[in-house]
Amino acid sequence: MKNLWRYLLLFALLLSSCKDLRLGREGDQTELAARRDLAEIQAEGKLRALIAYSATSYFLYRGQPMGYEYELLRRLADDLGVELELHVSGDLDEMLNELRRGSVDIVAHGLAITTERKQEVAFSDYLYLTEQVLVQRKPKGWRQMTRDQIREAMIGDPIELIGDTVSVRKNSSYFKRIRNLSREIGGEIVIDTLRGNITTDEIIKMVADGEIKYTLADKNLAGINASYYPDLDVEVPLSFSQRIAWALRPGSRQLLKATNQWIRKEKKQDDYYVIYNKYFKNKRSFRRRVNSPFYSLNQKQISRYDPIIKENSRKLGWDWRLLASLIYQESRFDPEAESWTGARGIMQLMPETAEELGVTATADAGEVISAGTRYLAQLYKNFAHVNDSIQRIKFTMASYNCGYSHVLDAQNLAQVKGLKDTVWDGHVDKMILALSFPQNYNHEVVKYGYVRGLEPFKYVEQIFQRYDHYRKFIDREEPENLSLAGS
């Protein structure tokens, strides 16, 4: 019996040691991620950025990813020479915690630089200046009232908020501002704390819809939203001017330095201010976007051709969002598109290919999508020896862009160079690029000569990048299975 207890004790100690070791490893990984700086980012080739879905930050419109933070992040990643890897926040109150845990390198969100936050994170140089304003509804029948009557019916001075309720997220700078304002005016303003997964745009809409009475918002964000909701008033300032910036880990000193150098360089260029005006000043564009069924924060549609694309994608066995991304790449969903090469229509079929597929000059977009899908299926069958379905799709797409013969040449060249001829990424894609140079397109295994390899290379890359955005915004509605049914 003594031996049994000795063995049980030894076993318990071993389990405890294993648990401590596992926790230690997990802690080490978290610590390593938290120490990640520019050198590690460039070595991996990826900048991990945390972003939020919103009407100005990141969204999908007419098949194209857009947004203020999104556009600037792309420019930053290009400047650093790395790929942009987007992480979408599910809780805006937890954004800085995610940064500290090391899961992302930068928080690209409109954060006000505050003394409290500076104790937790490092801030980039400011992107723009703004102030916080009160968001409130105008009185009923305000269109028939005089300006003085409207002012009389609304909050015109912060002191009038004493005893009233303002709704904001708890970890936002708005919460802190209301708390400080209560002290400044010597009376309590009741703070109604909202969930962290509600964006400022959505909270502004809640005021417009009468769900809540008041909220706070940055003036630029409040102004662009008020252009869509005319019943809103956003004219009462509740703060001094504030600097808005992105957050980084305090230890990421080289990334912070590189980001600040990039910001200073960007501010010297017109594009920097064009991008800002595009999302915060262009009221007509904002209203048109929000009213569109092809705006991802409104309805889950990519294009007017979604039903046709879904039907044809089932024949291919592809995710319909992937086929949609290819069609966007070809024509931006424009059935009248025509390229300098003579390719026409929504699928940009060459005249001889269209004739082989039975596409007439009077064919509508649905018929062209069907024909283009049949052509993709034909190309896909040429790569039956490629076991990985994603790689097989990439070969198919490259063939659709530059022709099967050139892709076959690239595969043959890959064999000669000691690369894998059944893997596109990092193998055959390198050879398609190599076919732009005489020493390669004149090689004895190359039968079809020169091809401007950058086009199919970027074609495949951009389709899959866009597809990644589509997956973030648009539900598949069908089982995930990226393969060609029945082949």
Image (cartoon, rainbow, N blue to C red):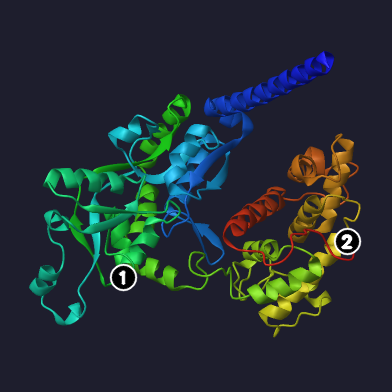
Query: Is disc 1 surrounded by few (<14), some (14 to 19) or many (20+) residues within 10 Å?
Result: few
Looking at the image, residue 12 sits to the left or right of residue 126; the answer is right
Looking at the image, residue 477 sits to the left or right of residue 246; the answer is right
Q: Nearer the viewer, mark 1 or mark 2?
A: 1
Write the residue at 65% across / 62% down.
325
* Label 1 SS: loop
Q: Which mark is residue 89?
A: none
Quick check: 377 above or below 355?
A: above
Which residue is disc 1 drawn over? 210
Looking at the image, residue 305 sits to the left or right of residue 378; the answer is left
Q: Whole-Å distance between the Cαs marked 1 and 2? A: 57 Å
Nearer the observer, 10 or 477: 10
Which residue is disc 2 drawn over? 381
Quick check: 483 above or below 107?
A: below
- Inspect this view and state whether residue 120 appears: yes
User: Residue 137: image x %, image y %?
Assistant: 24, 68
The quarter in which the N terminus is drawn is top right
* Label 2 SS: helix
Farthest residue to the bottom: give it.
362
